[in-house]
Amino acid sequence: MDRRTFVSLTGGVAGALSITGCQVTRTLPEAKRRPRVRMTVGTQRSPTTDEMLMYFRRHGVEHICGYPETDGWTGPRLQQLRERCELHGISLDMVQFPFMSSSHIDRADRKAIMLGQDPERQKEIDEACEIIRRCSEAGIPAIKYNLSLLGVLRTDPTRGRGGTSYSTWRLVDADPNIETRAGEVAADEMWERITYFLERVIPVAEEYDIRLACHPHDPGVPPEGFHGIARVLGTVDGLKKFVNIKESSHHGLNLCLGTAAEMLENPAEEIHDVIRYFGSRRKIFNIHFRNILGRRDDFQEVFPDEGDMDM
């Protein structure tokens, strides 16, 4: 796949539908339309402080995913954050939901959405919808999030070039007998929880013209699951099912190329079809430009220039 094809497949999308959803009211002017997004290089390192923004600018970074402070999720505070970025010549293109991160469920601050616990689940969804509205008011066009119970699974790190340490996953070295507060969660139950969330937040994202980008499960595990939990977003087929749950230009992926490669037996050959599938459907909202050495169930995260994929 050449660079021109890659860019054409991963370009941004624009436009909005108007469908009612969670307990929020529309304030976005009809005439407000954001320009079509082009592909840019950015970062998502936190915190989003003046010191960090100057660091980004020195290294030529002009687009970021930002991390508001704990008390920074009001509309005015989000707008101030965007304006602070702009003062440094940086575009705040996306933020991470303050919950629904890649944390393990046993360490997560908010648990109800992924545990399917009502009425707490609906309260968390209402809060997510309110954050969507506030981001729209502040001029922040996208939010990334995770729908995970097990978080990021890794075994002991391995030595890398120049004295570095590589994040590593070897299924054969992992303890399969760990219980979590989630108990056993079969694939059907996991899909029900994911669908419940999407059916309530995507209409609000459409209304307020906010793209929601979900990160895949990292890493994929055997089809029967791990620690009693099915990792339904840990396969390419699972991601295809995910993007088709709701037909919307505001529902897509934070496509981590490293995580996608971790789902494959031959990443160097198979990754191109993954990019083509989701890119041609305009479902790639942002990319984590990672590389690995290895394959499904046995890999190291490495520098982009030394992995199996030609990046």
Image (cartoon, rainbow, N blue to C red):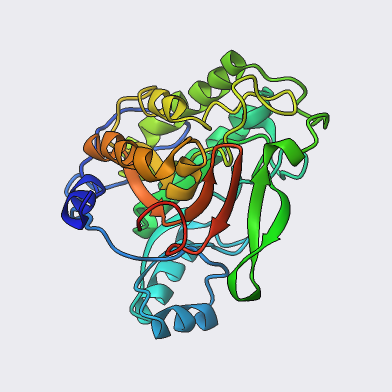
Above or below for 298 versus 41: above
Can residue 130 be spotted in the picture?
Answer: no
Q: In front here: 75 or 45?
A: 45
Q: In front here: 10 or 136?
A: 10
Rendering coords of residue 287 (x, y %): 39, 52
Q: Residue at x 69, y 59 (%)?
A: 158
Above or below for 75 versus 19: below
Rendering coords of residue 153 (x, y %): 67, 43
Q: Residue at x 34, y 65 (%)?
A: 41
Can residue 244 be spotted in the picture?
Answer: yes
Q: Residue at x 52, y 22 (%)?
A: 196
Q: In front here: 2 or 186?
A: 2
Residue 2 relative to residue 190: left or right: left
Rendering coords of residue 56 (x, y %): 44, 78
Above or below for 244 versus 1: above
Query: From the image, which quarter does the C terminus lie in?
Result: bottom left
Residue 256 relative to residue 208: left or right: right
